[in-house]
Image (cartoon, rainbow, N blue to C red):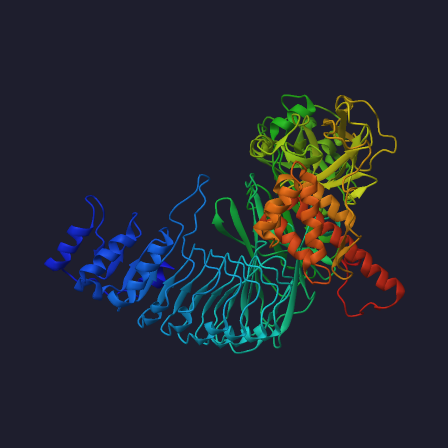
Amino acid sequence: MAAVAEGLEPEAAATEDAAQDAVDAVDAEPGDPPLLVGSRLSLDLYPGGCQRLLHLCARQSPQLLEVQFMQLSSHEDPRLLETTLAQVPCSLRHLRSLVLRGGQQRDVLGACLRGSLTTLPAGLSGLTHLAHLDLSFNSLETLPGCIPQMHGLSTLLLSHNHLSELPEALGALPALTFLYATHNCLRTLPKALGALSTLQCLDLSQNLLDTLPPEIGGLSSLTELNLASNRLQSLPASLGTPTIPEMPRLFLNSDLDSFLVTPQGCSVTLACGVRLQFPAGATATPVSIHYRLRLPEPRLVPLGPHDSLLSHVLELQPHGVAFQQEVGLWLLFVPPRARRCREVVVRTLNDDSWGDLETHLEEETPKRLWAHCQVPHFSWFLVVSRPVSNACLVPPEGTLLYSSGHPGVKVTFPPGATDEPRQVYMQVVRVASGELRALLEEPGAAASPLLCLSQSGPPSFLQPVTVQLPLPPGVTGLSLDRSCLHLLYRTPPEATWDDITTQVALELTHLYARFRVTHFSWYWLWYTAKTRVEGLARKAWERLRLHRVSLIALQRRRDPEQVLLQCLPLSKVDATLRRLLERYRGPEPSDTVEMFEGEKFFAAFEKGIDVDADRPDCVQGRVCFVFYSHLKNVKEVYVTTTLDRQAQAVRGQVSFYRGAVPEDVPEEAEAARHRKGTDSPWMATLPIKLPRLRGSKAPGQGQGTSLSLAPLNLGDAETGFLTQSNLLNVAGRLGPDWPAVALHLGMPYRELQRIRHEFRDDLDGQIRHMLFSWAERQAGQPGAVGRLVQALEQSDRLDVAEEVRAVLELGRQKYEDSIQRTGLAPPDPSASPSPESAQA
């Protein structure tokens, strides 16, 4: 808000009179900056600001009447601060900007400390010229009564306080333009807020709002509305009324699954890394837009052989509705390490087939990029890294297509190759000569770039098309041995390669080989002394698609039964282990494993250790993964054992399998030694050790057996239930993080202290009592499950929040299936096809 405050001060006087010099000389310490400079009075730069201001007021310095901008730290004694502020209306009657911020001091961990300000003297309402008031980083629980009487106020900053509500009297500020109340405890908003006809920017992010009053649609001058990180599930329809003359900017949290777009258009920013811009006229009538960020699933992630997924899957509804003007879409992603001869595109489902949109990259930071595209309608969207693709429209007159990543690769279309224009696509994949030589065990082996050609329309051309490939590195047309040159051809969908050298006429120049074809596929030029290379070509082609990864199994230091499983590209292992070292411990990562992008695999616990969770991604107690090289492949589960752990710890293991898990899980602890290459289902085995039980619990006494609470269902059928078993699982995983979760759930600190005292020396009892007492109070209240998920996220327990969402999603799916089976909700014939039916 520096710009807002800057506009309130007039130009400083060119010179200062002798009286001003005398005030500065008397009241500023040697070496300190001057207190009073022109119309600015800065008292927040060093301790004792209140004493200095009282001293100036006592002297009745005439220069105080000229002060329009004053800064005073609120890290002062509360009584002294109140006494000082009571003098302001008498001595600084022309004050236009008053800054009483806390946050200048920090605790031992570096966090900003709040100021001691809890209210304001009633006399401050006499500051008739005041236009800018900053009370951020203080301890306000209610809005001071003098503020609604400051009728000239245009900017009010209340961020980082303890406000639980705003008064109806706030609507009496006729000039209020900027209102910032982020990081508070606001649960409701006053209806009178809609009367602020001059309000342009309203920031209510990081609060506890679950509803908005319909009157908020009356903010006719609003241009920016930030509602991120609240508990909202929908926006009032009044926000879509055509009263706002300018396109508003909305900032929403990821839990809010819908918003309204009017013909006036709007700009929407979601906390999950998505931006949407609807130009004016994109819709003829108000349209409710629904969105969801899905975890990547193989059925929703169509990847080519050499593609990599960079984002989760964004679903925008209603599907298929055409906009009158294209909508701008921005997706945030982390750029891949290897970017040479590769490009980033947004992929979407369109007319029952997946295609790539024209994509532009915008850099936020070197490690965060936006993929921007224009979309004519809504569907599923994801960000993909792929080999550079070139395309052209081939007319009957013929044309030339060449690769922008490797100019030596080109295709010549003669006249008459087609009787109708058809689209042709080209992709070139570079091949590392070192890997090829190691595979062939032949020092002189080499291969050209891998070429993929495809087209729309009929499968064959009417006239042969000439393809040019560069000769393999180190080979020239003057010195090569033609018996060692092989042209390989692959026909999808089979993964076999055929040697077609004898079936085509190879024309060789000093640098290139040319040949003619009538239909398109994959082509590869090899130079090797081996006579049979088809099988080796298949292995080399698969190696180009493989990622070298390690598997990790770590246990929480404070709760070893909570196990984190992760699959990481080899380059990320060391950095990840350093980051997790303080909270987790475990064995060294597994040996290197090679996996395809999007490959499915399982983790199975053996020797008496089992997953203690009703997880949707569990198959008979085995956790299912899908590996994507640029996304977090993480599962965090709670494991238990039925063995007697009173006397000793239990040693077991977790094994990782490719594809389906074998029915008979082997018992060998050193299973990783028996791995037989890429195709082996057994990838790695890592040890797990559960310490012996502490205390006097009987063997087999499970968690939560001391509870006498009645069974409960938190939530509803449409949004999903959390049962007592689910809550017990959440409680078993919180550990020492439970106080942070409780505070974010709105539980008073005094109640936390009471629970700690009542269940001292019993951490599990503290957690269960907190969680179930909160859940009982939520009976019948909507949005309770959403508040729990948000509290887990705010407490940095994203792992538990993700699992709760997965349980809810499973419940929703079961509910929808049961409704369809009973015929209570017949399917809508106008609904968009599901991803399964679209791909069928």
Q: Is residue 17 left or right of residue 654?
A: left
Which of these two is toward me, 560 or 684? 560
Q: Which residue occupies 68% across, 69% down?
A: 321
Q: Quadrant of residue 555?
A: top right
Residue 279 appears left or right of 548: left
Question: Does residue 252 sit above or below 803 in this rendering?
Answer: below
Q: Residue furthest right?
A: 822
Quadrant containing the C terminus is: bottom right
Picture mark count: 0
The extreme left residue here reads: 18
On screen, residue 264 above or below 574: below
Where residue 289 sits: x, y (%)? 64, 67
**Quadrant housing the N terminus:** bottom left
Q: In the image, 205: left or right of 443?
A: left
Give percent across and percent down for residue 419: 70, 60
Q: Is residue 834 above or below residue 344?
A: below
Residue 819 can be seen, yes or no? yes
Q: Is residue 387 visible?
A: no
Q: Position of residue 16 (x, y in %)?
A: 14, 59
Residue 486: x and y in percent read 70, 32
Res 573 → quadrant: top right
